[in-house]
Amino acid sequence: MKITILGTGTSQGIPVIGSEHPVCLSDDSRDKRLRVSAMIEVDGKRLVIDCGPDFRQQMLKHDVKKIDGVLFTHEHADHTAGLDDLRPFFFRQGEINCHMTSRVHLALQERFSYMFATENKYPGVADLTVHEFNTDNFMAAGIEVIPVLADHGFIPVHGFRIGDFAYMTDVKTIAVREQLKLKNLEVLVLNMLREEEHKTHLNLDEALELVRELNPKRTYFTHISHHLGFHEDVEKKLPEGVFLAYDNLKIHI
């Protein structure tokens, strides 16, 4: 299995020149963060997690020609705003399989009504094949996916376990029964926004506490605010086996 971290950034906060952490001015490429997304490749099949505003740029960067499925964590724009950019893949390959909860499906039908219309559908848009999931494991392109329910402060959000890898973003809390799905992991990718507490995202202390509870072999933090600071400085603070992810990082399991 190969995991590519397509983006590690967030829309939380606006960088200000002259602020304490002007990461936007950093010369370190690891401080250049597009919105969060990941790509998983297993046995010649390719799944993408989320489809945010930077989706097109991310696909071009990695010369992606075909997508076998898209998994959606939740409905927020920084995870779904690139939906219409699935269009060229539909032109190239035909069917685009998208896996989401009924809640996310309804939100996308409202926001992208021109794509989901049953009458007078806008010509040329991607004709998405939507598969709704709830609590049960499901298959995406022949790959077993275990959905993991978490709380995003005010709304539910889902992460996904595939084999010994799990991807959890926009998490504030995870119930104990769902944490059981995240035991014995080789790699966990987990959101960690900043050091200060936040209403809807894990901060550094909360994320590290969850890592200690789940005890994966390796953890990579994502969904990083510029308030956290520079990659090189932050990594020095992290315990053994815990790393700060960066855009275009490749992880092999």
Image: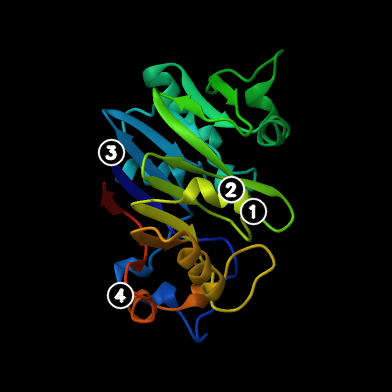
Q: Are marks 1 and 4 in contact (CB under 8 Å)?
A: no
Identify the mark nearer the N-term, 1 or 4. Answer: 4
Residue 175 numbered tag:
1
Q: Residue tagged by mark 2?
A: 178
- Is label 4 or label 2 in front? 2
Near-viewer residue (104 or 21): 104
Give above or below for 243 relative to 91: below
Give above or below for 144 relative to 17: above
Measured from the top left, where is residue 42 in percent x and y?
A: 30, 33
Q: CA distance from mark 1 to mark 2?
A: 5 Å
Measured from the top left, where is residue 235 in percent x and y?
A: 35, 76
Identify the secondary structure beneath mark 3.
Answer: loop
Residue 63 numbered tag:
3
Please name the amino acid that badge 4 sits on.
Asp
Residue 27 numbered tag:
4
- Which residue appears at 35% of the width and 67% of the height? 243
Identify the mark nearer the N-term, 2 or 3. Answer: 3
